[in-house]
Image (cartoon, grey):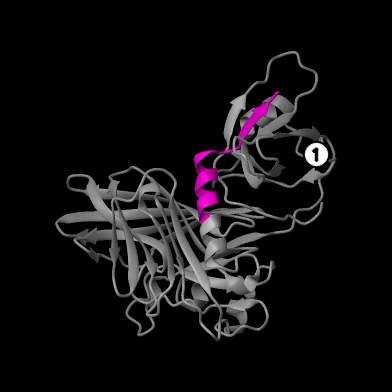
Amino acid sequence: MGSLKAYSLLPMAVLVLACGGGEPTKSIVVTNPLDIERHEFVAVPYGEFTSAFGRDSVFRIINMDTGSEIPYQLETKGNPSPEQILLYVSVPASGDVTLAVEKSAPEPVAAKTFARYVPERYDDFAWENDAVAFRMYGKALEGRPDDAHGIDLWSKRTTGLVVDKWYAHGDYHTDHGEGMDYYSVGMTLGAGDIAPIEGDEVVYSKHYRGHDVLDNGPLRTTFQLDYEPWQVGEKTVSVSKRYTLDAGSQLNRVEVTYTIDGDGALPVAIGVSRRAEEGQLLNEQGSGTFGYWEPTDDAHGTTGVGVILADGEFERFIEQPKQYLSVLTAHDGEPIVYYNGGAWDRAGKVTSAGDWFAYLRAAKDKAASPLQVEIK
């Protein structure tokens, strides 16, 4: 198959089952409700797929309009058997595409996403796709002079996977042609981490204590980080964070679940590091969207960072000298779903504040109006 191009944010597809009995041949129809062309991943529940097409372990999926092969991944979500089939599709504005399933061997799919625990670098946990990379700091970094709290963003200008390579040579603060880590996190939430807040002050946890990789490519990587309980005022809280990163996307999907002892409600903030010089903001709190195009670093270029709530709006906004905070309320055991991530102008895909803010707004629209999938 050809290389994948023009990826976009993944919303969860809506499956409308139409598998009437007696039909000799079934197909998958993906419909786009928006008036924009879309290049995204959709997910078909594995049980519905096998009911329609059988349980053959060898198959390929074809775009019936173009004859091109559709890359896919069997997604397990950490279970022994597949939970769904992840498909990368291109769908015209307000149109649809029809896919056929053939009983023949598919073309290999190159790995475009990856995550791993990095014990050799103070318990980092790092993850990436073909567009961007991130890391979260671990227990061994606590108390060191170089300790930091939030999500670190690595700036890439290669579609290759770099995590293992950069950790191996250790000089990832220098651009050797593939990009670098020049994003400064410090004692902030970095590139869109989340934490409880009291008044206007963030109440940080310790670093993550548990990690579990649920799927690791080639097209989607999902993992979970777990944190030990800590005190927020008179409440004891703990949290689990599940990250999903798809090939080509500048954004993670983050599902955060707090356990809260007390009245079961907790103000939390999603934060973005702020620089001393003036940058440009997209601050649409009523739609749950925040974007920051940082001031240009003459030596390293310009980074954009953003946060999108999957549903709802932010309750208030706080400007601090070192970070911007968008506040909402967490409830005991109820997941918060949001997207976070960034872009680097030197990668050549997003090169201005206008580009970045348009990307975030489009991502919000797509999350609100997912592609629809029908088997018939």
Position of 129 with respect to 149 (left or right) is right
Residue at screen point 65% across, 35% down: 94
Residue at screen point 75% across, 24% down: 26
Above or below residue 218? Residue 343 is: below
| Residue receiving disc 1 | 62
Q: Residue 89's image quarter? A: top right
Binning the other alpha carbons within 10 Å of mark 1 as few (below 14), some (14 to 19) or many (20 upward) gives many
Above or below residue 292? Residue 170 is: below
Position of 322 with respect to 233 (left or right) is right
Q: Residue furthest top?
A: 22
Residue 367 forms part of the magenta stretch: yes
Above or below residue 197? Residue 78 is: above
Position of residue 318 measured from the top left corner of the image (x, y, whole percent)? 28, 63
Position of residue 22 measured from the top left corner of the image (x, y, whole percent)? 75, 13
Is residue 319 among the parts visible in the rendering? yes
Residue 145 forms part of the magenta stretch: no
Is residue 229 among the parts visible in the rendering? no
Position of 250 with respect to 64 (left or right) is left
Above or below residue 142? Residue 112 is: above
What amino acid type is highlighted by mark number 1? Ile
> Between 322 and 118, which is closer to the camera in this rendering?
322
Position of residue 314 measured from the top left corner of the image (x, y, whole percent)? 33, 51
Position of residue 275 measured from the top left corner of the image (x, y, whole percent)? 39, 77
Position of 343 with respect to 269 (left or right) is right
Residue at screen point 44% across, 46% down: 310
User: In the rendered structure, which segment of residues is drawn in magenta?
Assistant: 360-376
